[in-house]
Amino acid sequence: MPENLARFLLKRRWIIKPGLESTDPFAASARYSEELSAQGVSLAGKRVLVFGYGGRFAVGADLLQRGAAHVILCDHFVLLDDERNRELLSEYRKYLKEENAEVRPRGEYITLLHGDIREASLQKQIAQADIVLSTSVFEHLDDVPGVAQALAALTAPKGVHLHFVDLRDHFFKYPFEMLKYSEKIWKNFLNPTSNLNRYRLQDYRRVFEANFENAEFAVIERLPDEFAKAKAAIRAEFKTGDDDEDATTLISVRASLPKLLEK
C-alpha cells in the first residue's frame, strides 16, 4: 500500500501493529535501563540517541526521568503523535511544552532529528551520543551497513549501542515465510510497505563487527520447531548449516568502541 496510507494506519493502530516504543514506550525505556545497568552502563548524565522513536516523546522523557542528560529522538519521517504526546504533559512538563496548540520537546532536554541519518548535513546537527538505542528498527532498514556506519560515526569514543532486532517475518504466524522467496519475488511482490530486509544473525554480526571493536549478540528467542517445518523451503542463502543459529528470531546487539571508517 502507499507509504502515507501505511503510516496513517500505523498511527491509529489500525491493521498494522507498531513496535514497543509506540505500544508501550515505558516498557521500552525500562528494558533499555535494565539491560544497560546489567552491562554496567548508567544513564546518569549521558547523551542518548533513540533511533526510530515513532513520533512519541514518551521514551525520551522517561529516559530523562531515569537520569539521562539529553535525548536525541531520531526518525526518518516526521509523524508526531500529538494526541499521545499531550498525555505526557502532566508528568513530564519539565521536558515538554505546549507551543502553537501542539506539544513540543524543550530543546535543552530533547532534540528531534528527522531525516536520513546517513546524510552528512543531518549528522552535523547533533553532538556525539554516549548511548544509542533502538527496538525493532534494524530489520526494516534498506541499507543496514550504511545506517550502522552512520550511527557509529555519531557515537562518542567510549559510547555504547543497544539494539533489539526482530528477525521474523512480520506476518508472525509464519516467522520464516519470507526466507522462502528469491530477492526478485520478495522485492517486487511480497515485501511489506514497512520493508523487511531479511537480514539474519550472521548478517548483523558482520555489519556490527565491521563498525565496532566490540560487538556482542544475545539470542532472545529461537523457534526450532517452526524452523524445522519451514527448513526445506528456505533458500540456501538464509541458512548457515547451524539450525540453532538459523532458528533465531529475536536478538539483542551490544556494541562499543566505534571504528572510524572512511565513507
Image: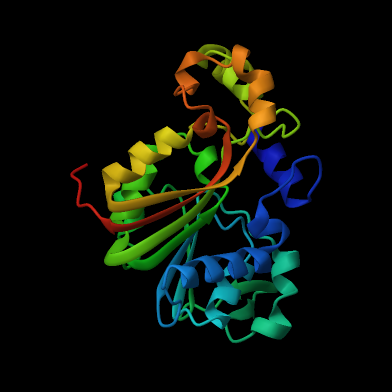
Q: How many marks?
A: 0
Q: Residue at x 70, y 65 (%)?
A: 82
The answer to whether residue 255 of the structure is visible from this angle is yes
Task: Quarter of the image for the C terminus: give it.
Answer: top left
Image coordinates of residue 29 in percent, x first then y, are 59, 68
Image coordinates of residue 101 in percent, x first then y, are 70, 74
Residue 141 left/right relative to 15: left
Q: Residue at x 64, y 69 (%)?
A: 58
| Outermost residue toward the bottom in this view | 94
Q: Is residue 82 above or below residue 139?
A: below
Q: Residue at x 44, y 24 (%)?
A: 240
Task: Quarter of the image for the N terminus: give it.
Answer: top right
Q: Is residue 167 above or below residue 150?
A: above
Image coordinates of residue 236 in percent, x first then y, are 48, 14
Q: Is residue 185 above or below residue 92?
A: above
Q: Nearer the viewer, residue 84 or 24?
A: 24
Which color scheme did the rendering employ for the protein?
Answer: rainbow
Image coordinates of residue 222 in percent, x first then y, are 61, 39
Q: Nearer the viewer, residue 9 or 251?
A: 251
Residue 32 left/right relative to 147: right
Q: Residue at x 40, y 59 (%)?
A: 161
Residue 211 left/right relative to 192: left
Quadrant housing residue 126 = bottom left
Quadrant housing residue 145 = top left
Quadrant housing residue 254 = bottom left
The answer to whether residue 111 of the structure is visible from this angle is no
